[in-house]
Image (cartoon, helix red, strand yellow):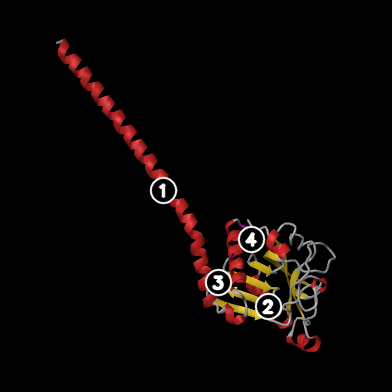
Amino acid sequence: MKYPVKKAAVLSTVLVCASLFFLLATSQNSFSKKSYTAAAGYTGNENSTASETATSEALYTELNLETAGLKKDIFDSAVKGMNKLNDNGSIKRDDIITIIDFSQPSTQKRLYVADLKNKKILFNTFVAHGKNSGALWAKSFSNQNSSLKSSPGFYSTAETYFGGHGYSLRLDGLEKNINDHARSRAIVMHGAPYASKQAVQALGRLGKSWGCPAVPAELTTPIINAIKDGSCLFIYTPETDYQQHSTVLNS
């Protein structure tokens, strides 16, 4: 009678050990799968940079920006910055991007508003720079009140209002010590008669603002309505100081 009991006890022990071994093997296998998934996810993130570059190149070609006078490296920087700002929640929209190219003189149509979703240029027109930033070219910049200078870098478009220049658009500067005083300086987009072909013909350049990106009066409303409420605006300058200290391009 004792032998069967002993045999049953041994069998029970064997079953318990087998169960423990199975659970351990399953746990290790699950861990391996999780580790593999994490590694695969990391690899995907690395490839996203190449994917973004390819997308930027395709958009540049489809938007025909070379013909419009915007260099590819400027567009690439703008899209790269916009993607970073979209990822961290600094902007609300990534369907529209506005680029102001201060490597061009004010006699050129150096403002570009692109619809990235539908792949077309909505506006390509004149834009004025600040009075103390230069005459024909914008070369000197400031983030300080009363400087009457433009500020380069990335902005988020904000709310609209009616002021001294009529329908206008507030801008929030997103780069610390570069343009983050834009709102307190009242740097806004507005229309102005001096931002026109007629001004170029009369002066040999556009007139100048107090630091605001002023656009042709007749295009003010459609431009503002297209870009308001959280889209990305990028004011480009080739100046070394900005290129070295941009908190978006160098992050």
Q: Secondary structure at mark 3?
A: loop
Q: Nearer the viewer, mark 3 or mark 4?
A: 4
- 3D distance between C-alphas at marks 1 and 2: 46 Å
Q: Nearer the viewer, mark 2 or mark 3?
A: 2
Q: Which residue position is annotated with label 2?
A: 110
Q: Nearer the viewer, mark 2 or mark 4?
A: 4
Residues in magenta? Answer: 89-93
First along the sequence among labels 1 and 4: 1
Amino acid found under the numbered disc labelled 4:
Leu
Q: Secondary structure at mark 1?
A: helix
Q: Nearer the viewer, residue 168 or 189?
A: 189
First along the sequence among labels 3 and 4: 3
Amino acid found under the numbered disc labelled 2:
Arg
Which corner quadrant holds the C terminus? bottom right
Which corner quadrant holds the N terminus? top left
Amino acid found under the numbered disc labelled 3:
Leu
In reply to whether residue 170 is colored magenta, the answer given is no
Crowdedness of circle 2 by 10 Å Cα count: few (<14), some, many (20+)? many
First along the sequence among labels 2 and 3: 2
